[in-house]
């Protein structure tokens, strides 16, 4: 159940554009989270977790503060979550999460990415049943058995724990994020999470070959360039 990370060499201009997109996506998500759950990270644990993740991804403080200040005003955009599913190049399965203030526009933009790569957007539930929606917490400095005991004592629905060179990765039900972190905090004190996310993890991976590889990379690039897209999940190996 791991995550796959890709390292790509890009020009300085492309790197700058990529950073701007990351800042924009975090800014939008922080704004929505602060507006919905409160501006104080100590009282809005989802916001605190999001800010910590943004800092780990090197999002500047002024971007974070601007998003919170925008939420403080009360007015502004009303974003909502939109999730799309479908079959990409090589019949791979894809889930796309968006935050949008115009669902019709966003659906049209996402559908165009499928159309231009000769693939098919599906209905809700068409591929998500082949993914597990999980809380993922990765951290070091603790014993696996002690961590598992603390989670089970708190009645956390633990799916799996991986131990790799002293780093533990806890997989739990997507609804158990707060309960799991609270249990770990009570047992071990403050924990610095290397990963603190809720993701869709494919139950089975599928390889691509030939022209499908190039088309898949084009498909991913088109989706990532959409301002409304927050996360993309797929089963490509």
Image: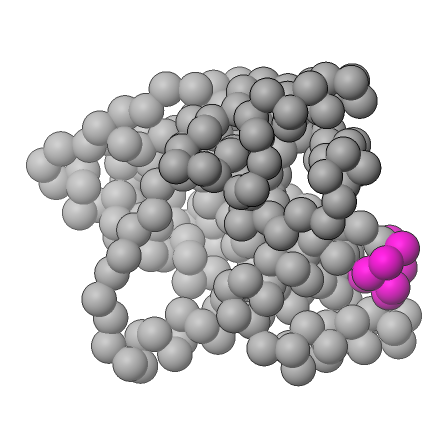
Residue 106 falls in which quadrant of the image? bottom right
Q: In the picture shown, does residue 81 fall above or below 135?
A: below
Furthest toward the left, the residue is 210
Quarter containing the N terminus: top left
Q: Nearer the viewer, residue 211 or 201?
A: 201
Q: What residue do we see at 62% from left, 52% from top?
A: 192
Q: Nearer the viewer, residue 84 or 51?
A: 51
Q: Nearer the viewer, residue 22 or 90?
A: 22
Based on the picture, tell me whether residue 41 belongs to the magenta stretch.
Answer: yes
| Colour basis | one colour
Q: What residue do we see at 47% from left, 49% from top?
A: 110
Q: What residue do we see at 18% from left, 38% from top?
A: 212
- Residue 117 at x, y = what percent? 28, 45
The stretch in magenta equals 34-43
Q: In the picture shown, does residue 87 fall above or below 216?
A: above
Q: Left of 176 or right of it: where is 168?
A: left
Residue 118 shows in this picture: yes
Q: Left of 212 or right of it: where is 232?
A: right
Main secondary structure type of the part rendered in magenta: loop
Q: Left of 40 or right of it: where is 32?
A: left
Q: What residue do we see at 65% from left, 78% from top?
A: 61
Q: Nearer the viewer, residue 232 or 64?
A: 64
- Residue 114 at x, y = what percent? 37, 43
Residue 176 falls in which quadrant of the image? top right
């Amino acid at each position: 159940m791991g995550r796959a990370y890709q390292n790509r060499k890009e020009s300085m201009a492309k790197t700058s554009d990529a950073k701007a997109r990351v800042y924009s996506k975090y800014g939008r998500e922080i704004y929505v989270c602060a507006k919905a759950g409160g501006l104080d990270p100590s009282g809005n644990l989802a916001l605190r977790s999001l800010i910590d993740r943004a800092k780990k991804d090197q999002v500047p403080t002024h971007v974070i503060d601007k998003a919170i200040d925008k939420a403080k005003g009360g007015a502004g955009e009303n974003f909502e979550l939109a999730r799309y599913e479908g079959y990409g190049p090589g019949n791979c399965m894809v889930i796309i999460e968006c935050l949008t203030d115009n669902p019709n526009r966003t659906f049209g933009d996402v559908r165009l990415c499928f159309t231009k790569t000769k693939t098919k957007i599906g209905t809700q539930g068409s591929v998500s049943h082949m993914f597990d929606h999980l809380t993922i917490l990765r951290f070091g400095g603790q014993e696996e058995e002690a961590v598992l005991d603390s989670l089970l004592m708190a009645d956390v629905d633990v799916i799996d724990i991986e131990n790799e060179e002293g780093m533990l990765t806890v997989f739990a039900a997507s609804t158990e994020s707060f309960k799991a972190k609270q249990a770990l905090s009570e047992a071990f004190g403050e924990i610095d999470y290397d990963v603190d996310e809720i993701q869709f993890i494919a139950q089975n991976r599928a390889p691509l070959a030939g022209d499908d590889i190039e088309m898949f990379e084009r498909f991913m690039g088109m989706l990532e360039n959409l301002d409304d897209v927050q996360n993309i999940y797929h089963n490509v190996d």
